[in-house]
Amino acid sequence: MEKKKKKRTAGDVIRTIIMIAALCVFCYSGYQLFTIYQEYKKGSDEYSALEEKYILQEDGMLEQLEAEEPTMKNPIDFDGLKALNPDIIGWLTVGAIDISYPVTQGEDNDYYLHNTFEKQPNIAGCIFMDYGCSRDFTDPNTIIYGHNMRNLSMFGKLKQFREEETFQSDPYFWIYTPDRIYKYEIFSCQEVGATSETYQLEFQDKKKFQEYIDSCFERSVLKRDIEVTSEDRIVTLSTCTGNSETRFLVQGKMIESYKAVKE
């Protein structure tokens, strides 16, 4: 006796459609994640290759030479980097969180959000100086931007300065340029609004600049026993937080300046 075939109900059809839709969503999500991973890898590989090729001698970073003014060997091959991209203005290292990247300056603050140092479209972008700042770091406040990448590349580790342990491990960062080498001591780490006055570049007078500095101290998540005055020059490192309304900043004052010399 033949068994009767079970009739498919409307519920069976709906469940099948849902399963197929779920499978499609899963496959699409997997493809999206793979694409993002590939983008991250391309960006990381490019910057790792730049660091390996154009940092000539790491020991030179700390080797001060005897001269009439403080002088230091420049470990960065800026001639080679300029041949790749004339927009380069410096190289930034933050020892406590293992940051080491070239710094560019574009004609606006948009291009290097979406393009790497070698001008390849990539979500990692490039570390870049605000287009309104002086290339020689002589402004009262120089702002440098970088993406908060999920794989912790670029400025993805900057938020680690929320922790006292990170700061205590190395409270300084360095900026190397073709002509000068600058050392900065961190004095403020803070979360601010995306349009905060902290992004101010120009100040009416010394008093206004001092008020700005004092406000940075007040908002800092770390309380530092360090004096910063309107006579100082500061650099602000800025990245996003995952919230479009806020940004995280690490600020340092210049404490040493060296004349850079080649090998």
Image (cartoon, grey):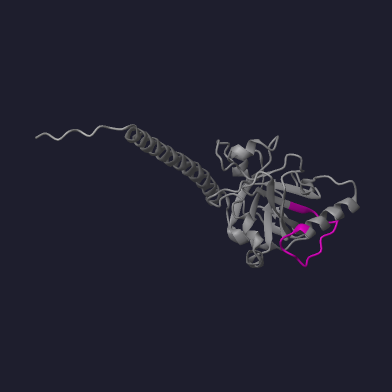
Residue 21 in picture, x, y percent from top left: 40, 35
How many marks can you see? 0
Magenta range: 219-235
Q: Is residue 202 magenta?
A: no
Q: Is residue 221 magenta?
A: yes
Residue 184 in picture, x, y percent from top left: 72, 58
Q: Give whichever of 104, 126 is nearer the camera.
A: 126
Quadrant (top left, top right, bottom left, bottom right) of the N terminus: top left
Could you tell me what secondary structure mostly forms the magenta stretch? Answer: loop
Left/right placement of residue 146 relative to residue 235 reads left
Tell me: residue 219, above or below residue 122.
below
**Quarter of the rendering containing residue 256:** bottom right
Left/right placement of residue 158 relative to residue 131 reads left
**Quarter of the rendering containing residue 227:** bottom right
Q: What residue appears at the point 17 percent right and 33 percent down from the top-left corner?
A: 4
Q: Looking at this view, name the residue that lies furthest to the left.
A: 1
Quadrant (top left, top right, bottom left, bottom right) of the C terminus: bottom right
Residue 246 in picture, x, y percent from top left: 69, 48
Whether residue 2 is visible to the viewer of this picture, yes or no, is: yes
Residue 97 in picture, x, y percent from top left: 60, 59
Q: What residue appears at the point 66 percent right and 60 percent down from the top-left corner?
A: 162
